[in-house]
Image: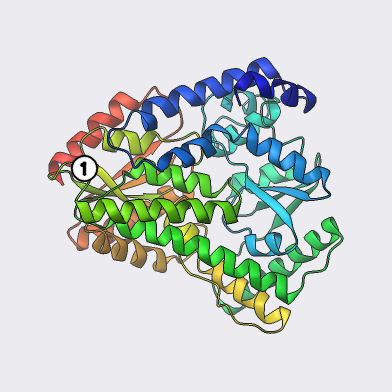
């Protein structure tokens, strides 16, 4: 369906339709230049392109239809939100995070300039009435992974149905108990929202679905380990971004088909990289929908991104929930334990992340590591010091790239990245 055919829907939702079209045109140009322009893409990437293209169109339409049938829809901002519980209670959820510079000025009318661009981009869409999810969500779920988010939630919670999950800053026994309590509280909040009670059978099915989704993403990443990778890092990122927006069951099916194509490409020796291309891992901050900047700069410089140690990468899908039938509290414990294994930079100490970066660097046979830090993201920026030291001890070259979503620094960054590739 063409953009103009959704205009009535956007107008009914109260969006600024003309400004919204400008947002979509801006993202569309970015997608064309950085994603669709790639050569020799897997044929079945077309589905995931459409997920991105239709994020403000048919996906919104689908959610509206779901809500008309009595369903509930929540928006999330972080991979710590337990998707299994939402799915088991029949709740549809979508990640609201945005990666476009277009909306940032609208957030800066309310929030300080010197905070994370991801937060400003996301809130800017809502403040400018260009986010179609804002008017249809039944609840939003925030988390306490950084100070900027915590204070932003304080502002938003006064204006909307908002639930905040407290993510501990350590991983001791007391912290794990705190987190388990937060998972139980989240369950209670969704039961209150839906009027349904969480049952072991539905939760077991949801756990299996999410494990299937994570396993399919892990399979995708396994093909990136090949000496001749069959898919680019940019396209792998598009798949991950789609994972945070699409229906889980449908996504699993389509990713399974893509994985079959990638397996065939590996067997045929079909690759997207030059034989001399440097293998790069991107580590640190996520690249959410609308943001393909760093991957494009790396790969347009002749290298290939073979692994993403980010929340739009391994942190999203690593570690499964044990599929054991049992009491509800046992299942909830297993879910809490799985999410507690995510190694966000909010944790201190965070030695397990350092170990994982080293492990992934070796597994994916990388030539170097680009530490990607969103401007004003102090957690990943400071943690980059210890990551760089650990990589240096192992003889693995690394560079830290601190940037936002704007285009102003792309020339400078490309020069730095090209110099880094020459030395790697």
Residue 195 versus residue 205 in the image, above or below: above
Residue 267 versus residue 350 in the image, above or below: above
Residue 38 versus residue 307 in the image, above or below: above
Instruction: Name the spot of residue 107 as percent of width and height, x first.
Output: 63, 28
Instruction: Check disc 1: other Cα within 10 Å, few if <14, some if 14-19, many if 20+.
Output: many
- Camera-side residue: 191 or 106? 191
Query: Which corner quadrant holds the N terminus?
Result: top right
Total number of numbered labels? 1
Instruction: Name the spot of residue 296 as percent of width and height, x first.
Output: 33, 34
Q: Residue sitting at 70 percent across and 45 percent down?
A: 153
Q: Which residue is mark 1?
A: 273
Q: Is residue 334 left or right of residue 366?
A: right
Instruction: Name the spot of residue 260 as percent of width and height, x first.
Output: 37, 55
Instruction: Name the spot of residue 408 as percent of width and height, x first.
Output: 39, 22
Q: Quadrant of residue 186?
A: bottom right
Q: Is residue 8 left or right of residue 120?
A: right
Q: Residue sitting at 79 percent across and 50 percent down?
A: 71
- Camera-side residue: 231 or 301? 231
Q: Residue sitting at 79 percent across and 25 percent down?
A: 12
Residue 307 appearing in the image = no
Report helix, strand or loop for mark 1.
loop
Q: Is residue 291 left or right of residue 362?
A: right
Looking at the image, the residue that sits furthest to the bottom is: 326
Q: Residue sitting at 57 percent across and 22 percent down?
A: 23
Residue 100 appearing in the image = yes
């Amino acid at each position: 369906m063409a953009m103009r055919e959704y205009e009535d829907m956007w107008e009914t939702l109260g969006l600024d339709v003309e400004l919204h079209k400008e947002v979509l045109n801006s993202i569309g140009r970015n997608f064309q230049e950085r994603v669709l322009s790639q050569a020799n893409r897997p044929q079945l990437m077309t589905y995931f392109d459409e997920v991105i293209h239709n994020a403000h169109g048919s996906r919104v339409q689908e959610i509206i239809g779901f809500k008309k049938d009595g369903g509930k829809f929540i928006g999330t901002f972080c991979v710590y939100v337990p998707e299994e519980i939402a799915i088991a209670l029949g709740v549809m959820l979508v990640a609201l995070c945005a990666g476009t510079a277009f909306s940032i000025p609208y957030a800066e009318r309310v929030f300080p300039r010197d905070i994370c661009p991801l937060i400003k981009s996301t809130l800017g869409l809502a403040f400018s009435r260009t986010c179609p999810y804002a008017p249809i969500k039944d609840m939003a779920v925030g988390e306490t992974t950084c100070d900027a988010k915590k204070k932003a939630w304080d502002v938003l919670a006064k204006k909307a149905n908002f639930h905040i999950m407290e993510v501990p800053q350590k991983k001791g026994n007391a912290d794990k108990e705190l987190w388990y309590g937060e998972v139980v509280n989240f369950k209670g909040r969704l039961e209150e929202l839906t009027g349904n009670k969480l049952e072991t059978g539905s939760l077991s099915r949801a756990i299996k679905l999410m494990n299937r989704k994570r396993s399919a993403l892990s399979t995708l990443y396994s093909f990136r380990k090949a000496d001749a990778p069959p898919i680019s890092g940019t396209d792998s990122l598009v798949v991950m971004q789609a994972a945070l927006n699409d229906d889980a069951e449908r996504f699993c099916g389509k990713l399974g088909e893509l994985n079959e194509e990638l397996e065939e490409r590996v067997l045929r020796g079909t690759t997207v990289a030059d034989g001399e291309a440097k293998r790069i891992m991107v580590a640190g901050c996520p690249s959410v929908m609308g943001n393909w900047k760093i991957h494009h700069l790396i790969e347009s410089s002749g290298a290939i991104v073979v692994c993403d140690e980010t929340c739009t990468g391994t942190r999203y899908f690593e570690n499964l929930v044990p599929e054991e039938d049992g009491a509800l509290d046992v299942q909830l414990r297993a879910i809490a334990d799985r999410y507690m294994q995510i190694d966000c930079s909010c944790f201190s100490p965070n030695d397990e992340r350092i170990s994982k970066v080293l492990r992934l660097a070796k597994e994916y046979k990388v030539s170097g590591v680009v530490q990607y830090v969103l401007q004003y993201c102090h957690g990943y920026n400071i943690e980059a010091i210890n990551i760089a030291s650990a990589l240096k001890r192992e003889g693995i070259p690394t560079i830290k790239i601190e940037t936002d979503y704007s285009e102003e620094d792309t020339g400078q960054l490309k020069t730095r990245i090209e110099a880094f590739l020459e030395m790697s």
